Amino acid sequence: MNVINLQYCHYSQLLLSRNLPLLVSIPSWQIRNLTQRNLSAISCKTRFCSPIGASMASGSVADTETKAFSVLFVCLGNICRSPAAEGVFTDLVNKRGLYSNFKIDSAGTINYHEGNEADPRMRAASKRRGIQITSISRPIKPSDFVDFDLILAMDKQNREDILEAFNRWKGRHSLPDDAHKKVKLMCSYCKKHDETEVPDPYYGGAQGFEKVLDLLEDACGSLLETILAENKRVQES
């Protein structure tokens, strides 16, 4: 049995099982844009429909968002790095007045923390920089390969797990054959840092969370400029 590097793992034993659940829900990027009062009005039938069906059936929603560029940030448990990346990127997009042109979300390769808020240490570190993290943990699902233009993995193991999930799902779901090309490493967008991966700060001290945010701010800034330069449908307002 291979030894798993805990630097990039919350619960290494969970990585021995690759059976990611095909969970069913409204895409969390939509839920996060609703108020708590509005959330209570969503019916159970709506919130627990088929993930692939939901992405295809909501024609009116899709029609109004055809110009939005969609980005999904992914780490292991979706409570530290990917929620922070979502928060950092959302903050940059908001400051440019571009939020309506983007769909931004985050997910994990496991469902261990599903339904939980982001790690309080990460939320506190982000808040000190003026960045709010409001995401709720969820695992990646088949429809993400349809709904998102770009899927950013925080480290190489995350990327491997995402691609493995895609290969497992593509035979059972109507997924684009080239969807694997959407998966990239977060640090591939860094300009000021030489790191190739965003390290998991879960078992470290406060400085680890600061380092993650430094890397994410660098990568997200470059990511936004790249998207704007390469996609005509995303225009500054």
Image: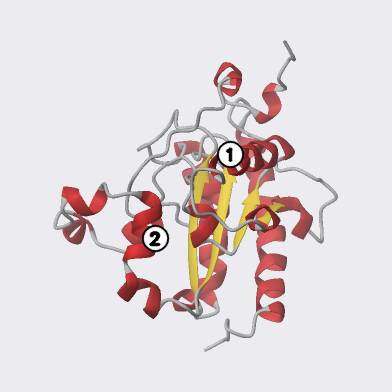
Crowding near the residue tagged with mark 2, few <14, some 14–19, many ≥20 C-alpha atoms within 10 Å: some
Residue 13 sits above or below residue 20 on the image: above
Q: Name the kind of residue labelled 1 in the image.
A: Ala
Query: On the rendered structure, is 33 left or right of 196?
Result: left
| Residue 4 vs residue 140, the one in the foreground | 140
Residue 3 sits above or below residue 201 on the image: above
**Residue placed farthest to the top in the image?**
1
From the top left corner, tell me how far across and down residue 39 is, in percent.
Answer: 21, 56
* Residue 114: image tag: none
| Residue 227 vs residue 24, the one in the foreground | 24
Query: Residue at 61% across / 55% down in the picture?
Result: 151
Query: Residue at 45% across / 52% down in the picture?
Result: 133
**Residue 197, quarter of picture:** top right
Q: Quadrant of the N terminus?
A: top right
Query: On the rendered structure, is 159 left or right of 168?
Result: right
Q: In this orientation, does residue 27 appear? A: no
Between the residue at mark 2 and the residue at mark 1, the CA separation in whole angstroms equals 18 Å
Crowding near the residue tagged with mark 1, few <14, some 14–19, many ≥20 C-alpha atoms within 10 Å: some
Q: Are marks 2 and 1 in contact (CB under 8 Å)?
A: no
Q: Name the kind of residue labelled 2 in the image.
A: Ser
**Residue 200, quarter of picture:** top right
Question: What residue would you read off at disc 2?
Answer: 55
From the top left corner, tell me how far across and down residue 174 is, in percent.
Answer: 50, 54
Query: Residue at 48% across / 56% down in the picture?
Result: 105
Query: On the rendered structure, is 53 left or right of 163?
Result: left
From the top left corner, tell me how far across and down residue 193 is, in percent.
Answer: 82, 53
Question: What residue would you read off at disc 1?
Answer: 165
Dot 1: element: helix
Query: On the rendered structure, is 80 left or right of 111?
Result: right
N-terminal label among 2 and 1 = 2
| Residue 191 vs residue 141, the one in the foreground | 141
Dot 2: element: helix
